[in-house]
Amino acid sequence: MPRMPPSSSRDNLSTREGLVASLPLVPSVFVYGTVFGGLAVQSGLRHAEIWGMSLLVFAGASQFVAVPMIAAGAPVLSVVVTTYVVNMRHYLMAATLAPSFRSFRRAWLVLIAHVINDESFAVAAARSSPPHPGVYIGSALAISAAFVGGVVVGTLLGGLVRDPERYGLDFAFPAVFLSLAAVQLRRRSDWLVAIGAAVLALALALAVPGNWHIVIAGLVASAAGALLLPVDPA
Amino acid sequence: MRGHVWLTIVGMAVATYLTRAPLFLALARRPLPPRVRLWLRLVPIAVLPALAIPMVLVRDGRLAVGLGQPALWGAVVVLLLAAWRVNLFVSVAAAVGVVALLRAVG
């Protein structure tokens, strides 16, 4: 293990704790990666591109979003901006995690920032407040290995299906997005935001060519919700 | 090597790192204001349906809503299962199965 202040033996212990606490999530993250890898192959991306994306971007939801756009020949800028908006939620996690990592060297922070992910954040935040850095790192190790491992297996299996539309596999993309959205709906007003965004996106998609309806509807509906709805109890 | 795909991937990587690193490296002492936190929480709740619903309901630039549309039933299935907290893989697999079945009989 790399040396990390303040006490390395205690940190090793908490790293292991984070790793173990994340094991129940490993199968589903692995399968999520496998589905992504398989669908990306089906969409015409090459193995190196899929692996490169998974290592360099390392943000599942946005990768699912990007693949059908890339496959449809969307302009680079629209894919990049959409990715940014889908991943804006990282600001929330980064701000919450940051104070716990004050004693770390900057070189480590540059690296650790890259593996900020929903699952590890949930694991670390559920165990203590503020989240423990060791627990977070242990979880990020488990989750990133599971995701990338799943992607590799998925790309190798994905070429086996010859006629994806026949098996409804093209529908897996919207199905993943709807499923990811539905599990985040906590308050009744969240539904309002989701439905408002869907209706606005539908209207824009019919009126405006290209993929900008996603970003516009997403930002407008979420901003309207944030301005008009009561703030979350902390 | 397909230049535009790699350009897209590198652009995505930079855009994503910009959502992770700045506040993390700034070691923010104060939590984000509540309305900003609410907004950041709502962004994916808005973006994901904004992405999915037109994929489900628009075919060739036109609205395709009807009981004969397999995608509509797939969406209903995945939303119900996800709302019941069925895990992502199972709900997506069930929805994909329903769409495949309806396409086969339709």
Image: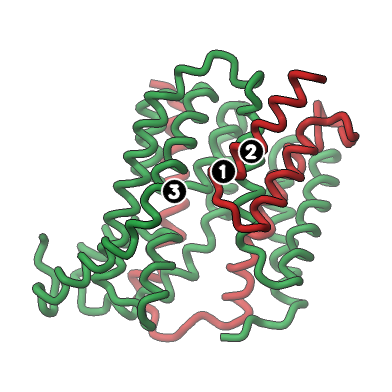
Chain colours: A green, B red
- Decide: is A216 above or below A6: above
Q: Which residue is mark 3?
A: A28
**Which circle marks residue B94 in the picture?**
2
Instruction: Verify CB contact (< 8 Å) between mark 1 and mark 2.
Output: yes
Q: Amino acid at mark 3?
A: Ser
Task: Give me the residue at 41% from left, 69% from top.
Answer: A94
Q: Residue at x 61, y 44 (%)?
A: B91
- Tell me the number on the disc at residue B19: none
Report the chain holding disc 2.
Answer: B
Residue A71 pos. (x, y %): 57, 27
* Image side of residue A144 versus residue B12, left or right: left
The quadrant in which the N terminus of chain A is found is bottom left
**How far across and down, in percent of the image, does residue B28 sit?**
39, 79
Q: Is residue A79 above or below residue A23?
A: above
Q: CA distance from mark 1 to mark 2?
A: 6 Å
Which amino acid does the dot numbered 2 rest on?
Answer: Ala
* Residue for badge 1: B90
